[in-house]
Image (spheres, rainbow, N blue to C red):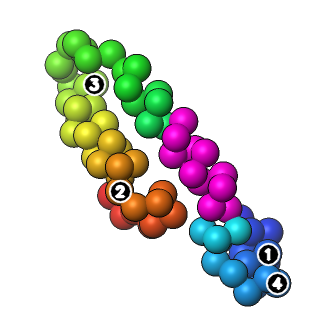
Amino acid sequence: MAEIVKLSLIYGRSFESLFAMIMAEAKRDLRKRAKTLPKNVRSYVGTFNRTSSIERLRDRLAEGDGTEEYGG
């Protein structure tokens, strides 16, 4: 992390601009993988937040260009 901050300072650019391509690729990969998650998962304590967490992830992946900062 310290190296990323140093690069940001050296080049006068934000982290997002330095790694936009990597973030876009990760976003595409996560979108693809989210489509293959099992739908019929037994509901119990271990999966209580699963559905809403996956839905929030899908919403974030659908927004903007993938370089925004998300706060949960």
Q: Quadrant of the N terminus?
A: bottom right
Residue 33 shown left or right of residue 22 in the figure: left
Query: Given this view, does label 2 or label 4 mark the residue nearer the observer?
Result: 2
> Is the residue marked by circle 1 packed among few (<14), some (14-19), or many (20+) residues within 10 Å?
some
Tell me the chief SS of the magenta region: helix
Residue 54, by quadrant, is top left
What amino acid is labelled 3 in the image?
Gly
| Alpha carbons under labels 4 and 3: distance apart | 45 Å
Q: Is residue 70 above or below residue 34?
A: below
Secondary element under disc 2, as helix, strand or loop, is loop
Q: Is residue 24 magenta?
A: yes
Q: Which residue is mark 3?
A: 46
Q: Which residue is mark 1?
A: 7
Residue found at x 22% / y 13%: 40
Say if mark 1 contacts mark 4, CB within 8 Å: yes
Secondary element under disc 3, as helix, strand or loop, is helix
Of 46 and 16, nearer the camera is 16
What amino acid is labelled 4 in the image?
Ile
Secondary element under disc 1, as helix, strand or loop, is helix
How many numbered marks does the figure carry?
Answer: 4
The answer to whether any part of residue 53 appears in the image is no
Magenta residues, start to end: 19-29
What amino acid is labelled 1 in the image?
Leu
Residue 10 circle label: 4
Q: Earlier in the sequence, mark 2 or mark 1?
A: 1
Residue 63 circle label: 2
